[in-house]
């Protein structure tokens, strides 16, 4: 059977089988990277501490390491055997930390240097998706010299303005009129040298976690996100109990599968590995799904979406964390090269 539309329960069954044969001692001394220097530091601390607690509960010799408080080169002195990356955003999810770990010869969770660097850059990501025929909203890069009227003529209203290298909705503005564009640009430019504007797709907000690599990668259950007043901002993503999450989504089966297929193709086009999460909008007029972005180091907080999808596939949080870490054993064997 094609991995597109694979039987979802099979992933959970395989994970359970793999973990039943896993010798936790083979994982050695594990470093959990958390915190960091990005605007998502607070969320990274929440994710990392959750991962750390889960690994220790499974008997793993796990230790936290915050590259926001310590020089990352100190990793070489810690004698770690492998690394679980719980960093979000720049200096952790963008290929820089992955490059350092490669130089140190330390296997790590998640995508490699190139896929991480591509996925953090929303413009580069879109260019790759478009070249692969994958649907994503129309966009253009903004500068201080942009013609705001021309931008609106191209992308329509409302439109979304956001930093090209930030996540968690940091610096994001939904622009409803031309006069709002300059302020939206300034907000995003205050966080990033590159700013992107894209057509705002009105409809259901969805997310689809992915696992694996290459032709063996597969999609986990899709989650439908219903934030209060259609405002899925930083607060409503991580701290509010008002946001609703539906898994299963309640979408027609063929539409649900179309979202999974699109997310999986997006993941493969970027060369991602181990895990990731594609954010998708479903156009309420046409029913067509559009890719927004790819997360290569997804959140692992109490409000996070990958654990939610994994649970729907039969895998609880602790086993999800342990399985993700176990995939670093394959890097030693050259499977991920």
Image (cartoon, helix red, strand yellow):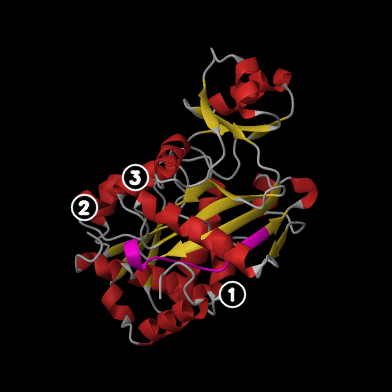
Report the span colored magenta. Answer: 214-224
310 lies above or below 103? below
What residue is rendered at 58% in x and 45% in y?
A: 168
Count of marks placed on residues = 3
Marks 3 and 2 close (CB-CB < 8 Å): no
The residues tagged by marks 3 and 1 sit, at their Cα atoms, a distance apart of 30 Å
Q: Secondary structure at mark 1?
A: helix
Q: Can you give x and y, in whole percent of width and height, for residue 221 in the image? A: 56, 68
Q: How many residues crowd mark 3 within 10 Å: few (<14), some (14–19), many (20+)?
A: many
Question: Mark 1 vs mark 2: which is more N-terminal?
Answer: 2
User: Can residue 302 be spotted in the picture?
Assistant: no
What residue is rendered at 37% in x and 68% in y?
A: 325
Tell me the tag on residue 312.
Answer: 1
Q: Is residue 30 left or right of residue 313?
A: left
Q: How many residues crowd mark 1 within 10 Å: few (<14), some (14–19), many (20+)?
A: some
- Occupied quadrant, residue 188: top right
**The N terminus lies in quadrant:** bottom left
Question: Mark 3 vs mark 2: which is more N-terminal?
Answer: 3
**The C terminus lies in quadrant:** bottom left
37 lies above or below 221? above
Residue pointed to by mark 2: 104
Q: Secondary structure at mark 2?
A: helix
Tell me the tag on residue 95.
Answer: 3
Q: Is residue 262 left or right of residue 152?
A: left
The residues tagged by marks 1 and 2 sit, at their Cα atoms, a distance apart of 36 Å
219 within the magenta span: yes
Which mark's residue is nearer the viewer, 1 or 2?
Answer: 1
Q: Can you give x and y, in whole percent of width and height, for residue 310 in the image? A: 53, 71
Q: Secondary structure at mark 3?
A: loop
Tell me the tag on residue 132.
Answer: none
Q: How many residues crowd mark 2 within 10 Å: few (<14), some (14–19), many (20+)?
A: few
160 within the magenta span: no
């Amino acid at each position: 059977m094609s991995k597109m539309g694979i039987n979802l329960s099979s992933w959970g069954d395989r994970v359970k089988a793999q973990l039943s044969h896993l010798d936790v001692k083979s994982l050695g001394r594990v470093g959990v990277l958390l915190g960091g220097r990005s605007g998502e530091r607070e969320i990274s601390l929440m994710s990392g501490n959750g991962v750390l607690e889960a690994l220790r509960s499974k008997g793993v010799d796990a230790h936290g390491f915050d590259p926001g408080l310590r020089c990352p080169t100190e990793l070489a002195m810690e004698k770690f055997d492998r690394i679980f990356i719980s960093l979000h955003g720049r200096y952790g999810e963008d290929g820089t930390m992955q490059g350092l770990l490669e130089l140190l010869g330390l296997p790590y969770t998640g995508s490699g240097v190139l896929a991480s660097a591509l996925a953090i850059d929303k413009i580069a990501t879109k260019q790759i998706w478009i070249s692969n025929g994958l649907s994503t909203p129309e966009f253009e890069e903004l500068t201080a010299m942009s013609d705001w009227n021309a931008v609106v003529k191209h992308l329509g209203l409302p439109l979304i303005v956001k930093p090209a290298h930030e996540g968690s909705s940091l610096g994001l503005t939904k622009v409803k009129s031309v006069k709002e564009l300059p302020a939206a640009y300034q907000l995003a430019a205050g966080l990033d040298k590159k700013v992107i504007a894209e057509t705002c797709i009105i409809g259901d907000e969805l997310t689809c976690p992915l696992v694996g690599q290459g032709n063996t990668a597969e999609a986990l259950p899709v989650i439908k996100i219903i934030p209060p007043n259609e405002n899925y901002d930083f607060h409503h993503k991580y701290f509010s109990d008002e946001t609703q999450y539906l898994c299963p989504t309640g979408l027609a089966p063929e539409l649900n599968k179309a979202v999974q297929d699109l997310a999986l193709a997006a993941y493969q086009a970027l060369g991602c590995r181990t895990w990731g999460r594609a954010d998708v909008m479903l156009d309420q007029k046409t029913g067509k799904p559009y890719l927004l972005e790819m997360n290569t180091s997804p959140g692992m907080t109490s409000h996070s979406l990958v654990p939610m999808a994994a649970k729907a596939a039969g895998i609880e949080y602790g086993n999800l964390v342990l399985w993700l870490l176990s995939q670093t054993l394959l890097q030693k064997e050259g499977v991920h090269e």
